[in-house]
Image (cartoon, rainbow, N blue to C red):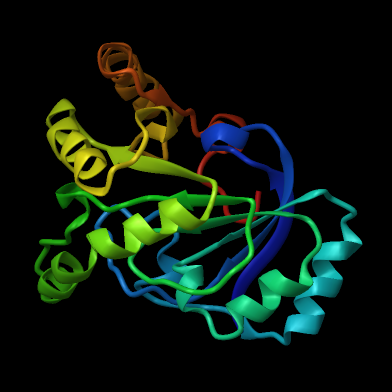
Amino acid sequence: MKIAEIFYSIQGEGTLVGVPSVFVRTSGCNLRCTWCDTPYTSWEPQGEERSVASIVDEVNSYGATHVVITGGEPMIAPKIEELTGRLTQHITIETAGTVDANVRCELMSISPKLANSTPHTRESGRWAAQHDRLRYQPEILRRLIQLYPYQLKFVITNPSDLEQVNGIVEDIGALRNRVVLMAEGVDAAILAERGRWLAEVAKREGFRITPRLHIDLWGNRRGV
């Protein structure tokens, strides 16, 4: 498996925010989000090839009870099924929900990509058609929410995004109390500004919002 990094930190987003966790970040993605905060796993995939055994040994060395497998898109990583089968900790998988795999996890953290994710700059525009074709796969989403405990985490750039969120939730039959809204951004001040109007949206719609606690604590730094 190509691994960009493994590190011990706290979960900064979602329903398990604040929980000490080991992060296993796979490298490689089938999407190209314009605001991707880990371009070293998608636009320019970096990392080293690691055996499943070496990954498990490093994860176990931290003594943590929770593991987050993220990316990139971990569901396309070779041997992802073997890795999740060999880890004994509570596993969260961070996925866009475009690919299916027979994994073990206690929380499937699904982040369906909205239209705000599609790249349109001159340098990245060639990815737009592929990204738009792949970013929303309702049949896969329906299967994932049926098979696993889940949260649906949506990256929000402006209030108009909520029309798409409500459409997806209705289309796949998700529970509204499993929906988590997260302001887009990698700067604490921007996140705070967007978070204020997002809180009003959440109150109106009955959704949960999540901070990006790691941004508040360490900024947009890699490996924390």
x, y (%) of residue 82? 67, 80
Q: Nearer the viewer, residue 4 or 136?
A: 136
Looking at the image, residue 112 lies above or below residue 153 = below
Q: Is residue 196 left or right of residue 131?
A: right
Q: Residue at x 17, y 26 (%)?
A: 159
Q: Residue at x 46, y 28 (%)?
A: 210
x, y (%) of residue 52? 73, 82
Image-quadrant location for residue 139: bottom left
Number of residue marks: 0
Image-quadrant location for residue 124: bottom left
Q: Residue at x 39, y 21 (%)?
A: 192
Q: Nearer the viewer, residue 180 or 35?
A: 180
Q: Is residue 132 left or right of residue 111?
A: left
Rendered-image quadrant of the N terminus: bottom right
x, y (%) of residue 9? 72, 46
Residue 173 seen in the figure:
yes
Q: Residue at x 55, y 29 (%)?
A: 216
Q: Is residue 162 left or right of residue 66?
A: left
x, y (%) of residue 207? 36, 23
Q: Nearer the viewer, residue 137 or 159?
A: 137
Looking at the image, residue 186 lies above or below residue 98 = above
Residue 123 seen in the figure:
no
Q: Nearer the viewer, residue 56 or 34?
A: 56
Q: Is residue 3 left or right of residue 122?
A: right
Image-quadrant location for residue 32: bottom left
